[in-house]
Image (cartoon, rainbow, N blue to C red):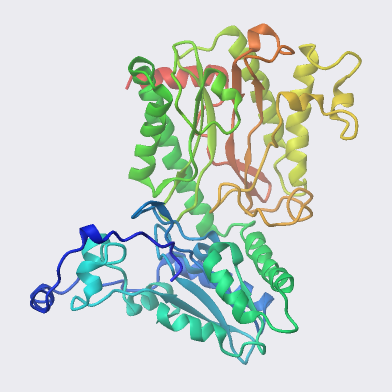
Amino acid sequence: MSSEEQKKPENRARPTTDEFRAFVAEDWAPRPPGPSGLSEAARYAAERRAAVSKAFEGDRLVVPAGGLKVRSNDTDYVFRPHTAFVHLTGLGGDREPDAVLVLEPRDDGTHEAVLYFRPLAGRDSDEFFADARYGEFWVGARPTLEDVETELGVTARHIDEFADAVAKDSGEVTVRLVRDADRDLTRQLDEARTSENTDHDALAETDDELAHFLSHLRMTKDEWEVQEMRKAVEATHHGFEAVIADLPEAVAKGRGERWVEGVFGLTARHEGNGVGYDSICAAGDHATTLHWIKNTGEIREGDLVLLDAGVEVDSLFTADVTRTLPASGTFTDAQREVYDAVYAAQEAGLAAVKPGNKFSDVHAAAIRVIAEHLHAWGLLPEGVDVEGTLDKEHGQYHRRWMVHGTSHHLGLDVHDCALATREEYMDAELQPGMVLTVEPGLYFKSDDLKAPERFRGIGVRIEDDVLVTADGHENLSAGMPRTSADVEAWIREVQSR
């Protein structure tokens, strides 16, 4: 329905006879039994849907999973459902391309949750053996309608019924759609919803209200979500230790950034669904490029390796951790000087993570320490002190060496809750259940003539995933050493196993 169209070359077509159809449908053992009850994820998803229902009483709400995206010719990218769909259904992994969750309004003000999707086809169908994109022979079995109802506690219907169901009562019922989940579906629904009194801009505004609510809904995690975040962090810890164990190989074999990416990716696929975002495996001067995801460089003996990576577990919650590791196992004096400055800034940022403080207070605490070090090193312009550079109207010189923010919300998306307003995000008070990163850094590019020569080519970032608690915070990734001395000891310990 909404997956991108694949080219189907005629030169690979196979003849299909009626005799073959009958033969291939015969003599199959019963399929294994489906789910026996409601999944744990689905129980919590039901509570989230209730909150959405209450906020949009009487409206029909449409939340697509999205479709398959063509990578090249007749091959697709691995499917990852839209975050809002995951959050409201409890489905993880690569489930279910082209599906659509509809919250159908009832007369009593509540909603019925209906999941439209492509269910398992019978073995007597051409799809079973001949459809390379959806067929069971090619990509495996999908759930039945009954499986989905048992697992998720929603009403399940065939995707072919969706178009008529969503368009009924057009003009009488407000239909809201998560627009960015499926752009083809958005165009179709816009045509169905447009009338003399409703233009495209009005539709987009109506939809944006829903998208904003769903994004902000994820800002405070429930107990199950926190549990999933712990799993993601634990798997990420294992991935970092696998990289540390193989650092000598990454140096010796060449193309070391690729080696690091592959080693972490192995753990991510083994312990979770995969990586939560493209891993940053940056050695030497590449570590001064904030989002270096090419990972094409060498790792040399004296380099620092900045690894910013996270495992996405099967529920699709992801960690986001950064450690900066000396490839040789020991920091040089200059590397340690920069590293210790970043560590001090992170400690200040972590101390600011507590209820009652604003989200923006975390950055303010960390960036002040960064500014203090830059001032002590004589890098700020003559006559500019710490307060001068922190001046938001006439200062900000320190941003030459730390241009990014210190924190972001974390969860199903690595940069979660992105559609929350500034008042709900930067200016909001921290609340128990929020999960955020604390990740200051310093980046001295090799061609930066304002940087001391000893610092040029050094990039350092330290990032941890932090849960706000009733009386402060819990560093979920605290098991991964952070001080320069502890990082060196960590490397020695892992490589001696």
Q: Is residue 264 above or below residue 248?
A: below
391 horizontally vs 257: left or right: right
Which residue of the protein is positioned furthest toward the front in this rendering? Answer: 11
Q: Nearest the camera: 182 or 328?
A: 182
Q: Nearest the camera: 294 or 403?
A: 294
Which quadrant: the N terminus? Answer: bottom left
Q: Is residue 387 above or below residue 430?
A: above
Q: Residue at x 88, y 13 (%)?
A: 382
The answer to whether residue 244 shows anywhere in this view is yes
| Horizontal and vertical percent position of residue 483 | 57, 22
| Horizontal and vertical percent position of residue 183 | 55, 64
The answer to whether residue 32 shows anywhere in this view is no
Q: How many marks?
A: 0
370 horizontally vs 395: left or right: left
Q: Nearest the camera: 394 or 495?
A: 394
| Horizontal and vertical percent position of residue 297 | 46, 22
212 horizontally vs 293: left or right: right
Which quadrant: the C terminus? Answer: top left
